[in-house]
Amino acid sequence: MELNDDIRNIKGIGEKTSVNYRRIGINTVGDLVMHIPRGYEEYKEIISVKNAPLDCNVIVEGVLSKRPSVKSIRNRKIVSAQLNDGSGTINLVWFNMPFLANSLRVGAYYILRGKITVKNDGKRMVHPKVLTKEEYYNRLHKLIPIYSLTEGLTNNSLMKSMAYAIENLKPVKDYVPAHIIKECNVMPFMQAVKKIHFPNSREEAAEARKRFVFDEFFTFLLMLRYYKKGSVRIKTKRVYTHSEECNRLINSLPYKLTGAQKKVWSEVMSDIKSGYIMNRLIQGDVGSGKTIIAALALLLNAKNGYQGALMVPTEVLAKQHYENFVKLFEGFDVNVTLLTGSMSALAKRNEYENIRSHKTDIIIGTHALIQEKVIYDDLGLVIIDEQHRFGVNQRKNISDKGNDCHTIVMSATPIPRTLAIILYGDMDISIINERPEARLPILNCVVGQSYRNTAYSFILKEINKGNRAYIICPMIEESESSELENVNSYYIKLSEIMPDNINIDILHGKMKPSEKNEVMERFKNGLTDILISTTVIEVGIDVPEATVMMVENAERFGLAQLHQLRGRVGRSDRQSYCIFMTADERKEVMQRLEVLNKSNDGFYIADQDLKLRGPGDMFGVRQSGEAYFEIADIYNDADMLKLADSAVKSLSDEDVQRIIEICPKKNRYTETVPFFAL
C-alpha cells in the first residue's frame, strides 16, 4: 500500500467504517499512520484488592458480589456494582453507561483496570475498564497505544488497522535530506512510523516522537521561508484619514487606556494610515485589553468607508463580542452584524444581503465569515482572535475576501521573544504587557492534596457571595490516563461533596459545538455555579462573576498554559483567586509552580517556562495547549524548534524548492503556516 491509498484499502475497513475514520480526518493510509497516539497504557500483573496501591492504575480480578444498580445524580446516570477477590471488596462506579447494569452478572468473574481511591463507603474504582482474559494476556507487559477516537471507532479496531497498514506500507522516501537527519540526530521516517505506534519501550517512543516534532517544526519553517522569499511591502489603494471618532470613543470609556494599549493603538493607526498593507500580531495576556484595540481599529476602518470583520473561534465568544460592540458603538452610527454557523438559513440570507450591500460596517463571527456565500462590499480590515485556532486555509480565505486588506491577528499565548522571532518571521509584533487599572491582581496559591477540603470550602464561600468557579481537570475519562483527575469521575465526586443547591456542569473537547455553547451559556447566565472543564475552557468567554479557578494536577501543565487558564478569572473589578492543586510535591515541582504564585506577567512566566521546564509527560498534557502544532509544543520542545530553524537556514533556495516539491502535499504541518506568510 502507498500513503495516498484510500483508507478502504486496509483490511477490515469498509464503506461504513470509513465514514467514521473520515469524521476525524483520516481519509488515506497516510492519514492513518500519521494519527499519532496521544499516550500509552502499560498492563502489569494482576494485584490483590488488599495490596493494590491507591491513586494509580492497577489491574484486579474477582467476582461481582453485588447486583449492579443505576441511580441518577443531578440528571446523570451512574451504575454501581461491587467486586470481591477474597482479599477485599471494591465498589465499582461507571459514569453515563447505564447499559452495563444489564450486561454485568452477579457471581461472574471479571478482570478490571482502573484507579482505586478510598471513600466513606470503602475502596472505589471509578469508570474501570472491563477486560477479557485474552485482552489482558495479549497486552501484559506491552505498551498499548491510545488514540483519539470518534463514535463508531474503538481503540482495538484502530490498533489492528494501524498494524495492518504499517506491515503492508511500501517504503517511503524521506523528504528530509539525509545529512539533516544525521546532523539533527532524528529517526528516519519509516522507522519513526513503526516505533511511534508500536514501541518496545518508552525511550523508543520518545525517540520516534522526536522525529515527528522535528517534522512539524521543519516543515513549518520551510514553508514560512518559501512564502517569505522575495516578499515586499504591498501598497494599498485604500485611504484612511478620519480618526476623530476613535478619540471620542477613547474619551467615552469608563476607564483609561494603559500605556501599553496607547502604544499598540498608535502602532496600529500608523500602519493603517501608512499606505501599505498592515500585517501585525498583537500579543497580550488574557484580560490585558486587546479587544478595545480591535474595536478602535474597526471603528477607524468603518468611518473611512470600509467594512471590517472580526473572526473568533467559538460562537459563544462571537455572540459576546457582538453584544459588547453594539453597546460600545451606540451613538457612533456604526452597524454591527453577527454571523455564525448555527443561525437559521433565513437569518443567514438576510445577513449575506446586508454584508453584500454594505448595510453593515462590522461583521463579527466564526468560520461562517469565510463561506462562499459571504460577499463583502469592500473589506478593508480583518481581525482574527486567537489566530492559532484557525487552519491556514480559513485564515487566508478571509483575508483574500478583502483583496489585500489590512490584517491584525491577536493571541493571548505568551511566547518568549526568542521563539516569537522564529515563529513569526518578519511580521510586525505588538505587545500589551499591562493590565487595566480596574482589574485586581489574581491571588494565587500552590497547594498539595491536604488542602483539598479547604479549597472546596473556599469555593462554596465564593458561590454563596454570588460568584462562580472553574475546576480544570487534565482528562475526560478515567481510562485515558493513569493518574490524572478527569472530568467525568470528578463530577461524581464533587456532586457528593457539594450541597444539592449547587449546580455543577462539565465541559470537554469531545462535546459537539452546540453542546459546548449550551454549557458555556448556562455558566455565563448563572445557571451553573461550578464548571468542571478540560483545557477547552482556555479560549472561553468573559464571565465577570467567575472569581475562583482550581487546577487539578497542576504539575502536569506548562506554566504558560496554566497562566492562560488562570486568565479565565479576574475579568472584573471583583477579587479573583487561582488554586494550583498538585499531586506531586517534590521540591523541583513546587519551585516551578511557585513562579505562578509570585507573578501574573505572562511573558515573564513564558521565559521561566523555558528555563524551568522538566521532561514532562511525553504524551500527556500539552505545555502550551492547542497552540500552533498538533504534536510539537513550542515550550517543551523549544530546543527542537531551534534545531529545525538552524536546519532550514542551512538550506539553499534550490534545496528549499526541491524539498517543497517532494513534501507531502496534504500535510497537517503545512496547515500551521500562518496565513500572513501566504
Image (spheres, rainbow, N blue to C red):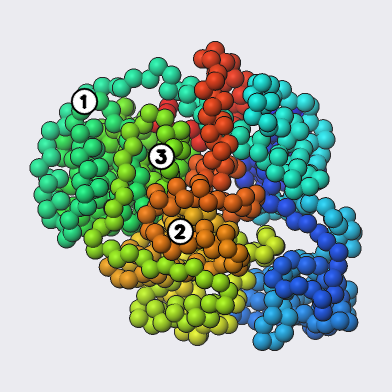
Residue position for label 3:
417
Asked which secondary structure carries label 1, the reply is loop
Q: Nearer the viewer, residue 637 or 526?
A: 637
Q: Residue at x 86, y 57 (%)?
A: 140
The kind of residue on which mark 1 rests is: Gly
Q: Residue at x 23, y 32 (%)?
A: 271
User: Which disc, if any, is residue 595?
Assistant: 2
Dot placed on the residue nearer the N-terminal end, 1 or 3: 1
Residue 130 screen position, x and y as percent: 79, 66
Q: Nearer the viewer, residue 426 or 610?
A: 610
Residue position for label 1:
275
Label 1 vs label 3: CA separation?
A: 28 Å
Q: Is residue 120 left or right of residue 374?
A: right
Say few, some or many: other residues with alpha carbon within 10 Å of mark 3 (under 14 / 14 to 19 / 20 or more): few
Q: Nearer the viewer, residue 587 or 183?
A: 587
Dot placed on the residue nearer the N-terminal end, 1 or 2: 1
Q: Is residue 191 left or right of residue 263?
A: right
The kind of residue on which mark 2 rests is: Val
Q: Is residue 557 left or right of residue 193?
A: left
Can I make out residue 541 in this image?
no
Asked which secondary structure carries label 2, the reply is helix
